[in-house]
Amino acid sequence: MPYTLICKPPARSNHKRLLWLLFPVTCLFSLPISAGEIQLASNAQVLALFGQVTSTQTPELIAREDGGTRIEWRGSITNDFYNVRAKGGSLVNPTSDGDFHRLQLAGDLRGITPDNRTTYLQVTGTHTDDMALQSNQNMVNSFQTGHFSDTYQVAFGDVNADFSTLGTRTGIRGLFGATRVGELSVLSFMAGTIAPTWNAVADKDQRSEYLRNAFSAKFETPLSSTTSAYFTAQGFADDPSTLSSANKNLAPVSGRTATAGLNYREGRLALGAEVGISHWSPDGQDDETTHAFIADGSWTEENYTINWGHHDFGTYYTSLSAEAQPGIMETYLAGNWRTSSWLLLQGDLRHSRNKAADSFGSVTAVTTNSATLIENISFGEGWPGLGLALSQSISDGKNEDGSDNRQLGYGTSLSYGDQQWNGSLGFNRSRLRNDGSPAYDGSTDTWSVQLGRSFMDNPANPTWLLSLGLSASLQDQELDSGDSTRTEQLGFTLAASRSGWGTLSAGYNIGWIEPTTGGPDLKNRGYYLEAAHPFKGDKGSVKLYLQNADNASGDKTLENETQTAGIQLELVF
C-alpha cells in the first residue's frame, strides 16, 4: 500500500524563517511530475546516499511476500553522565567545573512502496547542560527528509549540491531537488540558507555571522555518447536583519555567478573545462565583475596516469564552491608511474600566481614554481609488508617586492606491517628562506618512530584481541637568527576486545617543548581509560571512561588541566 505523508505548519511560531524553509516540503511531495520512465536511483543507491548524509546505520531492505518492501530502521539514545574538574582559569581553559549530562538522539524513519517510491526522515540532536560543549542546551545536529521516485527526487534539511567547481559545491540548510528532462538530461536545484547550525537559523541570539540566503540550479545534457554539457546559475545574499548591531563587524555581501562547462570521456582520455562569470557586490563598496576558467585532463594506462590542467580565478571571483579560490592562477602537470612490481613513482610540477596577494600586499610568494617527487618501494614476496617511501620537494617563489622565497624538503619513511607486528621509522627535513620575512628563515628536522604488536587466539577469526603500541617523535627547529625550538613526544596505547565481553582501551602521552622565546620549558601530559560492555542482542552498551589533559605545565600563566570521568549508556532500537 502506498505511503502517505501529511505535513501541516503549526498554528503559531516565532521562527518565521524556519517555517518558510519547511513549508515547501509539504507541497513538493504532492506535486505531479511529468518525465520519462527513468529510474534516478535504486533502493541500494538511495540507502548508500542516506548513509553518507548521516552517521546512522544504513537500514536493511527486506522483501515482502506481496511484492512490496518494508524497511528495518534503527535509532539510538545515548546518555552521558560525567564530572569535570578544570584548572587554569577561563582565559586558558574554557572548560567548566561540575557534574553534567549529555543526551544524544538519532533516528531514521522511512517507507518504500511497491512502485519504488521512498519517503524518509532522519534527525540527530543533542541536549546538554555543559555549555563548554555547545552554545545552546538543545541542538539539532542534523536533519533531512526527502522523497525519491523513478522520475524525480527531493530532499529538505542538511543537503549538499555538487554541481561544478566554479559554480556550486557546498552544503546548505534548505531544499534540493532533481528531475529528468526528456530521456537523458537532468535539471537540479538547491535553495536555502547557509548557517553554522539549525539553531542559528531559528534564533538570532545564536548567530555570530549573517545568515546567507542562497540558490543554485544546474542543467546537464549529453551532446553525444562521449560528451556532455552543463550550465549552472547561482546567487547568494547576506541578510542584514539576521544579526544584532553588536555583532555586525563585517559588511553584508551578495553575489551572482553563471557557468558553462563541457566533459569528454572516451577510452583512456578524459577532458573537462568550465568558464564562469561572477558579480560580487559588497555593501558600501564598488561592485566587481570577474571571470574564471578551468581546464583539466587525464590519460590513464595500465601502469601510469598523467594529469594536467590550468586554473585561472579572477581576483574578486565569487561562487558557492570552496574550490574556487579568488585570485589564484595555476598550471600543473602530475602523474604516477609503476615502473616495476617494486617501484611506484609519483610526481607533480606546478606554476602558480596569487593575484590577490599582488593586489592587496603580502609577504607570501606572489609567483611560485614547485616540484614534488615521491618514490614508493616494496621489497617483494621475500619481505611482504615492508615498504620504503622517499620524497623530495622544492618551491621557488617571488614576493610582491621582488624578493625571493624558497622552500626545500625531503623525507624518508620505512614501514612494516603484518597481522601481528607493525612499525615505522621516519625522518623529514625542511628548509625555509624568505627574503621578505627573514626572521623565520631556518630549518626543521623531524624524527618519528612507531611500534605495534597484536595478540589473538585465532588469526582467521579471533574471539579476543590485544594490541599494544608505542610511538615517539622529536622535532628540532633551528632559525638562522640563532633561536631554536625542540619538541619531544612519547605515547603508549592499549586496546583489547573479547566477544561477548566488550572492549578496553587506554593511552598515555607526554611531551616537552623548549620554546624560542626564552621562557620556561613546557610539559604536556594526558591519559585516557575506557571500558565498554555490550548489551545482549546488539541493543546498546554501557561504557565507563576517564580522561585527563595537563597542558603547558611549567608556565604559571598558561598551565591548565582538565579531568573528566563519566558513564555512558547507549540504547539501540
Image: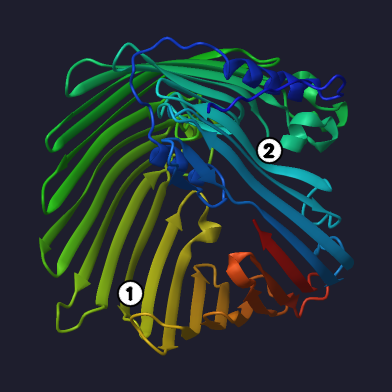
Q: Is residue 302 visible?
A: yes
- Residue at point 33% right, 81% down? 460
Q: Nearer the viewer, residue 321 or 70?
A: 70
Question: Crowding near pointer 1: few (<14 within 10 Å), some, many (20+)?
Answer: some
Closest to the camera, between mark 1 and mark 2, is 2
Q: Nearer the viewer, residue 568 or 333?
A: 568
- Residue at point 49% right, 45% down? 52
The secondary structure type at the circle numbered 2 is: loop
Q: Which quarter of the figure has residue 299? A: top left
Q: CA distance from mark 1 to mark 2?
A: 40 Å
Mark with earlier residue (1, 2): 2
Q: Is residue 94 visible?
A: no
- Residue at point 25% right, 20% down? 228
Is 382 left, or right, of 93 in this rendering?
left
Q: Determine which of the numbered discs, if any, sits on residue 413 in the image.
A: 1
Residue 540 rendering spot, x and y as whole percentages = 65, 65
Q: Which quarter of the figure has residue 340? A: bottom left
Give the answer, above or below, for where 478 lies relative to 296. below
- Residue at point 53% right, 24% down? 176
Is 438 left, or right, of 452 in this rendering?
right
Residue 213 rendering spot, x and y as whole percentages = 65, 21
Residue 371 rendering spot, x and y as whole percentages = 28, 52
Residue bearing mark 2: 196
* Quarter of the image that includes the C terminus: bottom right
Question: Crowding near pointer 2: few (<14 within 10 Å), some, many (20+)?
Answer: some
Proximity of marks 1 and 2: CB atoms separated by less than 8 Å: no
Query: What amino acid is found at the position of numbered circle 2 in the picture?
Result: Pro
Q: Nearer the viewer, residue 353 or 484?
A: 353
Is 37 left, or right, of 249 in this rendering?
left
Q: Nearer the viewer, residue 472 or 25?
A: 25
Query: What amino acid is found at the position of numbered circle 1 in the picture?
Result: Ser
Residue 112 rendering spot, x and y as whole percentages = 50, 34
